[in-house]
Amino acid sequence: MTRTIDSASAIVIGGGMIGCSIALDLLRAGVQTTLFDKGKLLQEASTAAAGMLGAQVEIHHPGAFYELCRFSQSIYKGWTEELEQCSGLSAQYIERGILRIAYNEEDEAELRSRLSWMQDAEWIDSGTIRSLEPGVAYGERGGLHFAKDHQIHPVHTARALEAALRREGCTIHEESPVFGLIEKNGRICGIRTAGEEHYADHIVLASGAWASALTEPFGLSLPIFPVKGQCISVRLPSPIIEHTVFTKGCYVVPKMDGSLLIGATQEEAGYDKKAHVSVIAALYRRAVELLPELAEAELVSTWAGLRPGTRDELPFIGTSSRLPGLIIAAGHYRNGILLAPATGKLIKQIVLGEAPSVDLSAFNPDRVLNLTPAH
Ligand SMILES: Cc1cc2nc3c(=O)[nH]c(=O)nc-3n(C[C@H](O)[C@H](O)[C@H](O)COP(=O)(O)OP(=O)(O)OC[C@H]3O[C@@H](n4cnc5c(N)ncnc54)[C@H](O)[C@@H]3O)c2cc1C
């Protein structure tokens, strides 16, 4: 069966935080939007995440990526407020920053070097760390306080986002894997699902760690791959930290419901999403070294998710000369929760032919063409 969608229409492939944010912005701009997911919406990386809005803590160099992260951070609160208004559900946005504790000499040097270019970072000594978070066991080398690196709860934000999308009239196809892109007259103009073809004016690829499977047959090999992250949620009878506490190899994020999220490993293990006892145990030991009171915690749950990693650690946002008609928004790696509002806005601007709010040249998918032999 072939179904044709009217003009000013878009198809978004992938219903993670990125695809859903794009769909919402397109709908609000009057673009008739249809979303396809191979499973249920928001069940992959986007709800496995810690929810840190780490425009400072995650960034190691100045440049375009830092500017993109800061842009998204600057519009985040308003974005969650709109979601909450539209859905009636809380995104659990917490305005409390991150303490990045220096782990060793090398780590301290890297953190100190950021002060020469980073906007919203303040060096704090061990005394200040102790006064802000008395439960932290080591902190004698000091660290950085990122007062603006707030957080949300990914599961709650996802619920609010999905409810807002449904309310705005998004056509949603769950359990509908997209098997291929349709090209006509040199342009991508549609998609294939099981037994169906769907067409729209704009096709947006936002399928996270799976994105390259759909561009590969057209000779565009996007270096996007799964980077597994295992996490633990625990609970204590009373709060032990107020800020997110982050050090090399481990972070602990206090959530609104009183639980503490401990994350996360970084593993290139294909599409395996199993949590492994030995790995979880090592992560937990590391967290207890940082916050000894965690030794008494009750286990709530463990899980793993697949970050859409890229070799240069930059997302792909924009179009490729190899695949006219396709708009790519994938490869957000460790920062897709933070970058969801910016990506939604930027893809909407591309669809409407408007100038993007931030310079997208560093994220242009064509940067991989020298790695991809022409067809
Ligand atoms: C443990 C962990 C901790 C993290 N912590 C943070 C954090 O603190 N802050 C932060 O900003 N980021 C964090 N991230 C990263 C963030 O989760 C990701 O960057 C983000 O979720 C990517 O969103 P996405 O929508 O691109 O991918 P996903 O959420 O994976 O969504 C992709 C969707 O595409 C669908 N799909 C795939 N192929 C197809 C197909 N062929 N047809 C139809 N649908 C398809 C999938 O089913 C899925 O629903 C973390 C990630 C992990 C795993």
Image (cartoon, rainbow, N blue to C red):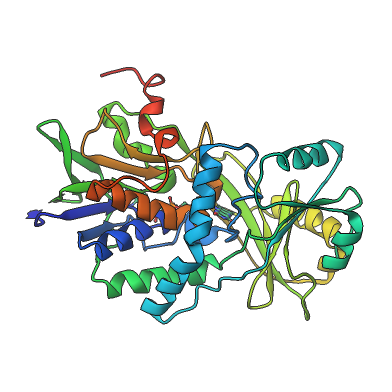
- 99 w.r.t. 236: above or below: above
Left or right of 314, for residue 126:
right
Q: Residue at x 43, y 76 (%)?
A: 84
Q: Which of 143 and 315 is in front in this view?
A: 143
Which image quadrant is residue 239 in? Answer: bottom right
Q: Which residue is drawn at 92% across and 51% down?
A: 140
Residue 110: percent from left, percent from top: 76, 37
Residue 46: percent from left, percent from top: 48, 58
The quadrant of the image that shows the C terminus is top left
The quadrant of the image that shows the N terminus is bottom left
Q: Which of 58 and 300 is in front in this view?
A: 58
Which image quadrant is residue 320 in? Answer: top left
Q: Which residue is drawn at 73% across and 43% down?
A: 115
Left or right of 360, for residue 179:
left
Which image quadrant is residue 281 in? Answer: bottom right
Total label count?
Answer: 0
Left or right of 127, for residue 114:
left
Q: Is residue 172 visible?
A: no
Q: Residue at x 56, y 71 (%)?
A: 93
- 244 w.r.t. 297: above or below: above
Residue 156: percent from left, percent from top: 50, 72
Q: Is residue 364 visible?
A: yes
Residue 278: percent from left, percent from top: 73, 51
